[in-house]
Amino acid sequence: MRILMAASEGVPFSKTGGLADVVGALPQAIARLGHEVAVVLPRYRMTKLPEARTALASLTIPVGQKLHFPAVLEGPPLDGARTFFIEYPPYFDRDALYGTPEAGDHPDNPERFTLFSRAVLETAKALFPPDVIHCHDWQSAMVPVLLNTLYAGDPAFERVGTLFTIHNLGYQGLFPPDVLAHLGLGWDLFQTERLEFWGKVNFLKGALVYSNYINTVSKKYAQEIQTEEYGFGLQGLLLRRADVVTGILNGVDYAQWNPGNDRLLAAHFTPEKLEGKRACKKDLLAQFKLPAKNLDRPLVGIVSRFTAQKGADLIAQVADQLTQEDFCLVALGTGDAEYEQLFRRLAQEYPEKIAVRIAYDNTLAHKIEGGADMFLMPSRYEPCGLNQIYSLKYGTIPVVRATGGLDDTIEPYDPATGAGTGFKFHDYTGQALLDTLRAALHVYKNREGWTRLMRNAMAKDFSWDASAREYAGLYQKILGMGRAAGA
C-alpha cells in the first residue's frame, strides 16, 4: 500500500509534544512492513533541512480571496519513509509552531493549516499518489473535509481512503464562523451535522464527519471519548460513528529510550544487571542538588506539563500530606502559573527532599527516567501517554490514574503473586493518589519484591512493530473506500 501521512509536527524536524514522536516513528515502522510511506509536514523556522531538494518550486493554493504559492521540498528519508515539507515563510517561518504563552495562538492558524491541508493534497497528486491518507490532529483535519468538498470531483482522489487519528480530543481547532469565508469554503458546512459546534467552526469535528475511519492512541481512550466525561462535546458524533472508531496504542522508540545504552545516563543497566540504576539515582540527586543522604529513600519523578489535565490539581489537594511521607521528589516541566508556583513553594519549604526544574529538558527527562524509583502520572485523562512506557523500560515503577493509555499499559501490582508492573487508582481525588503512592512506598521497603516488580516492568515490550501491524490492518480496511463521508 501507499500511505501518505499529514501532520503539523514530527521528529526529528519539529516538536512540541507527543504527536511529533508518533509521526517520527510510525512511518518508519509501516515502511519496515514493506509499504510505501511518505510524510508531509510544514517547514518551520526550527526545521533543519540541510539535505532538502526542491520537489515542486511552486503550488498555487487559494485560501479565501487570496492566492498563495508555497513550495514543496523533499527532505531526508526517515528509515524508508519519504519526507515532504510545505515551505511558505509567511505562514510557517515563525518562532513558535502554533502560538506563544504571551500572545496566545497565532490568529491566522485556520488559514495556515487550511493552506497546509490543500498543499498536502496537491503534493499527493504530483509526487506521491496514495491509497490512504492518514491525518493527525486538528491541524490536518481539513484534508478529509476538502476531499469531500472542494476536491469531490477530482478523479485523482476517487478511491483514496482517509484515516484520522485523535491524539488529544481536548484540542479541536475552534474558530469564529466567518473563518469559512476566509478559507474559501461554503456556508453549507456551517451545520450541526458538519463543522458547526456551539456557534463556532470546529476543524477536528470536520475530520470526524468526513474521514472513512477514526482512531485514537489507546483502546481505553477510544472508549472514553464516546462518553460525556471525556468527549469534549463530540461524544454524540463519535457514538454515531462508533463502528469506525478504534484505538491503537502508541509504540515507543527503544532506540532512544533504553537504559542498556542510553547515552544520557550516568550508567547503564539491564534487568539482569541493575547496579547501574543506583549510579543513575545518585547522579539525579546531584542534578537537582538534593542531598546524597536521599540515596536510600524512595525517589519519585515527574516529567509533565503542570496542568489540571495532568493531575497537578490532585497533587495540590494533598501537597501537605505528601510532604510528610518518607520519600523525595523531583519534578520537571512547565505549565499553568499556579502549579509552577506550587512546585516552587514545595521546593523552597522542603529543600532537602523536593526539587523542581521549570523547563523543557530532554537530557534531564532521561535522567529522571533512569534515576527515579517511581514515576507519578495522576492524569485526569491521558490518550496514550509515553512516559509511563519509558518508565517501565527503566524499572521506574509507574504510579498512575487508570485512564486512557495509562490503564492499558500498567498492570496493578499483586503482592500475593508478585505479578504486575505498577500501581494505579481510579477515583480522581487527591486522597486516591495519596493512598496509592503510600501503597507503592510500602512495597518499596521489601527490596526483593521491589526488584521483582522492576524486572516485570522492564520485560514489557511496547515497540512500534505491533502497533504498526494494527495500523496496516486498518489501512487494508480503508483501501478503495474513497469519499464515503461519515455523517
Image: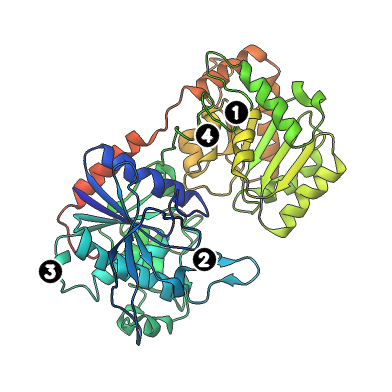
Q: Which amino acid does label 1 sit on?
A: Thr
Task: Name which quarter of the figure residue 283 lies in.
Answer: top right
Q: Give neighbour class at mark 3: few <14, some 14-19, many 20+ (Cα, 10 Å).
A: few
Q: What element carries label 1?
A: loop
> Of residues 311 and 434, which is closer to you in this image?
311
Choose the circle earlier in sequence order: 3 or 1.
Answer: 3
**Image height check: is 265 above or below 193?**
above
Distance from Cα at disc 4 to Cα at disc 1: 8 Å
Report how far apart the C-alphas of labels 3 and 1 lie in the structure. 53 Å
Towards the viewer: 182 or 375: 182
Q: What is the three-letter code of the residue carrying label 2? A: Tyr
Report which quarter residue 460 is drawn in.
top left
Per the model, the C-alpha gap separating discs 2 and 4 is: 27 Å
**Residue that numbered label 3 is attached to:** 155
Location of mark 1 (residue): 396
Q: Name the residue under label 2.
A: 98
Q: Residue 390 carries which label?
A: 4
Q: In this view, does 474 lie to the left or right of 176?
A: left
Look at the numbered discs 2 and 4 and tell me whether their residues touch, using CB distance below 8 Å: no
Q: Which amino acid does label 3 sit on?
A: Pro
SS label for mark 2: loop
Disc 2 or disc 4, which is closer to the eye?
2
Q: In this view, does 358 lie above or below 434?
A: below
Residue 367, which numbered label? none
Q: Is residue 202 visible?
A: no
- 252 to 270, vertically: above or below: below
Residue 70, x across and y down, in percent: 35, 72
Please give the name of the residue rendered at 84% of the width and 39% of the height, measured from the top-left corner.
351
Q: Which of marks 4 and 1 is nearer the N terminus?
A: 4
